[in-house]
Amino acid sequence: MAAPEIDHESPTPVYRQIAAVIIADIESGTLPVNRRIPSEASLVQRFGVARETVRNAVRFLREEGHVFTVPQRGTYVRDRSKGEGED
């Protein structure tokens, strides 16, 4: 798979561009519900960015409710079809 194009000149921060690609993967079913998203190292390699940039993207995805993190297990796609306040 070719690396997605990240526009470093865009007014949209790089971490938000990465988050948008991951959200597109979730919405397309490439990353299904309850599936672990790729590791930080994999995302660093895929996007050619610093680890901190990937961490910011994952943090954004978590804050927006797209993913959840299980300590020492990884970060997984959240089922957003459930109602608010449910898990």
Image (cartoon, helix red, strand yellow):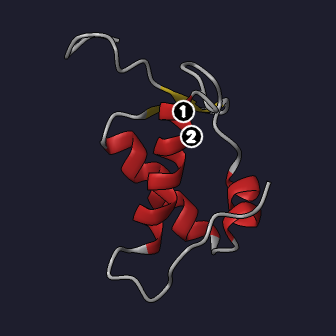
Q: Residues within 10 Å of mark 1 (few under 14, many from 20)?
A: few
Q: Residue visible at 53% across and 59% down?
A: 55
Q: Nearer the viewer, residue 80 or 41?
A: 80
| Residue 70 horizontal side relative to residue 83, left or right | right
Q: Nearer the viewer, residue 41 or 15?
A: 15
User: Where is residue 52 shown, x and y percent of the image?
Assistant: 55, 69
SS at circle 1: helix
Residue furthest bottom as drawn: 9
When asked about the image quadrant of residue 42, the answer is bottom right
40, above or below 44, in the image: above
Residue on which the image places disc 2: 25
Residue 70 visible? The answer is: no
Q: Residues within 10 Å of mark 2 (few under 14, many from 20)?
A: some
User: Where is residue 19 shown, x and y percent of the image?
Assistant: 46, 54
Residue on which the image places disc 1: 28
- Quadrant, the N terminus: bottom right
Residue 55 visible? The answer is: yes
| Residue 16 horizontal side relative to residue 76, left or right | left
User: Where is residue 20 shown, x and y percent of the image?
Assistant: 44, 54
